[in-house]
Amino acid sequence: QVQVAESGGGLVQPGGSLRLSCVVSGTQFSSYSMAWYRQAAGRQREHIVRLSRRGTTTFMASSVKGRFTVSRDNARNTTYLQMNNLKPEDTAVYYCYADGSSVGEMSSWGQGTQVTVSS
């Protein structure tokens, strides 16, 4: 069973930074492309970044371009979302998604981690 666990959320002031981590277990992590989504209160879940199995960023939403970067460490089964110059509109629950569809594996969501940007 694929398990996904995010961590690193919290309260940060505008202009600050946070790094979210996403650990995947129960499967061959290197076979998965990884994505981050976020959902603000009262809004639909938004796809913000996607990272290929080889570590290439294949999608980045315009709302975060130039401020967020995504990376992976296959040795640690972990994906990171580095968020810089945070804005109040970045406040949301951030979800990690392990996508195994391209290799016929089960995909799975994490439980989410809250990021609040406020002074």
Image (tube, rainbow, N blue to C red):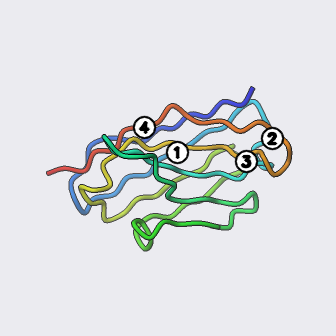
Q: Residue at x 82, y 39 (%)?
A: 105
Instruction: Establish if 49 lies above or below 96.
Output: below
| Labels 3 & 1 near each other (Cβ < 8 A) | no
Mark with earlier residue (2, 3): 2
Mark with earlier residue (3, 1): 1
Q: x, y (%) of residue 76? A: 68, 44
Kindly identify which residue carries mark 3: 75
Residue count near mark 4 (Cα–Cα under 10 Å), binned few <14, some 14–19, many ≥20: many
**Residue type indicated by callout 1:** Ser
Instruction: Establish if 76 lies above or below 52.
Output: above
Q: Residue at x 50, y 42 (%)?
A: 95
Kindly identify which residue carries mark 4: 113
**Residue type indicated by callout 4:** Thr
**Residue type indicated by callout 2:** Gln
- Give the CA distance from mark 4 to mark 2: 23 Å
Q: x, y (%) of residue 13? A: 21, 53
Kindly identify which residue carries mark 2: 28
Kindly identify which residue carries mark 1: 21
Q: Residue at x 25, y 50 (%)?
A: 117
Residue count near mark 1 (Cα–Cα under 10 Å), binned few <14, some 14–19, many ≥20: many
**Residue type indicated by callout 3:** Ala
Mark with earlier residue (4, 2): 2
Asked which quadrant contains residue 85, the reply is: bottom left
Q: x, y (%) of residue 108? A: 66, 36
Asked which quadrant contains residue 59, the reply is: bottom right
